[in-house]
Image (cartoon, rainbow, N blue to C red):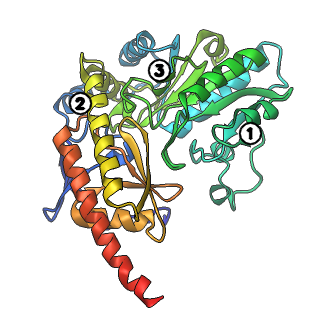
Amino acid sequence: MPTYNRADLAFERGEGARLWTADGRRFLDFGSGIATSSLGHNHPHLVRAICDQAAKVMHVSNLYRVPEAERLAARHVAASFADSVFFCNSGAEANEGMIKAMRKAMAETGRPERFRIITFEGAFHGRTLAMLAATGNPKYLEGFGPRVDGFDQVPFGNMNAVRDAIGPATAGILIEPVQGEGGVRPAELRFLRELRATCDEFGLLLGLDEVQIGMGRSGKLWAHQWAGIEPDVMSSAKGIGGGFPLGAILAKEHVAKHLKPGTHGTTYGGNPLACAAGNAVLDVILAPGFLDGVDRVARHLWRALVALKDRHPELIEDVRGAGLLLGIKLREPLVNTDAQAAAVAEGLLTVAAGMNVLRLAPPLIITEAEADEAVDLLDRALRRAKAALAPAKAAE
């Protein structure tokens, strides 16, 4: 179906942070499947884990125990705020389940009137009908009938607006610690702490969407750890499976205990193959020194991008983001899709984001040398894009 405007690129193989097309062109991948291929391409440990598990059993359903899922859940609990985990297949599915858990917890504790969730302008929580409403982008909502009720949007980072939106029907607050699709905008750590305090003050649940920024991308396992807070419930996907479809809802017991048998489910979620991939990813990310390395390379890349901005002040307005989810805010008339195409022409893959931002989300295994190479390619791409703009400006 015509749901994507696909680039005319077909990749045949990958290695680390690089991809090759069938005709032999090589690209440095700083999109990583939209922040999903967290260990890069063809990572030997991840490949071996998937192949070994596929040769045993791939799917049995949740009618039976799944030892691989039990092990993965126990490891995530040990490494996080959560008391239990529900595995699913995608970020949108994880966010749907998180909203259900928040509503169910309110209903089961004598507050069924509390079902509304405060969300934020610029958010992106997925493409299901409910998550379109949570996202609130009119462009995504158009043509799909009445908007699902239960979501109240407020400006990102505005604590007064949050408090004004709280009413007798409010169940909780849902936020991305770093908005990815919405323009790579990080929430201030102080704001995240204030949200936690406000939820405690009003008896609300704090839900975090760490689908894109989580699983090591910020330089810590979970981005909220930088703020020193804990949510009540959190969604994860993308990098959690290293490219294999996997999502998760992580929750504290006071939320999770209300999702009793029959209240939620999934056919594929938590299958042995997906959880073998998830365990392999954890093996790498939780290895001593790995996250410190992510943080070090991320800071190196940040400094290089700031220097790039200083070289191209007429094209770059700002550099933003956190860890290895960074955005280059471009100045018009240069638009992010044109910059993205120019980067492709130079051999670099990036991802466009909202607010005219060019997004960089490389695999977590990149080196400082690869970060420098990407910035050099971006420099060439910006010069290429600037040259393309010159004739149009001259014609005005």
Residue contact at pointers 1 and 2, CB within 8 angstroms: no
- The mark found on residue 46 in the picture is 2
Residue at x 47% of width, y 63% of height: 331
Residue at x 25% of width, y 23% of height: 290
Q: Is residue 107 above or below residue 117?
A: above
Res 157 quadrant in image: top right
Q: Residues within 10 Å of mark 1 (few under 14, many from 20)?
A: many
Q: Position of residue 276 (x, y in %)?
A: 31, 24
Element assignment for label 3? helix
Q: Residues within 10 Å of mark 3 (few under 14, many from 20)?
A: some
Q: Nearer the viewer, mark 3 or mark 1?
A: 3
Residue contact at pointers 2 and 3, CB within 8 angstroms: no
> Depth check: 182 or 207 in front?
182
Residue contact at pointers 3 and 1, CB within 8 angstroms: no
Residue at x 60% of width, y 44% of height: 123
Which residue corresponds to mark 1?
151
Q: Position of residue 101 (x, y in %)?
A: 65, 23
Q: CA distance from mark 2 to mark 3?
A: 26 Å
Lower sequence index among marks 2 and 3: 2
Which residue corresponds to mark 3?
225
Quick one: which residue is furthest to the left in this view? 24
Lower sequence index among marks 3 and 1: 1
Q: CA distance from mark 1 to mark 2?
A: 38 Å
Q: Position of residue 248 (x, y in %)?
A: 49, 27
Q: Position of residue 28 (x, y in %)?
A: 22, 52
User: What amino acid type should be assigned to the residue bearing mark 3?
Assistant: Gln
Residue at x 68% of width, y 29% of height: 173
In this image, 92 relative to 328: left or right? right
User: What amino acid type should be assigned to the residue bearing mark 1?
Assistant: Phe
User: What amino acid type should be assigned to the residue bearing mark 2?
Assistant: Leu
Task: For residue 264, say whether it is visible.
Answer: no
Lower sequence index among marks 1 and 2: 2
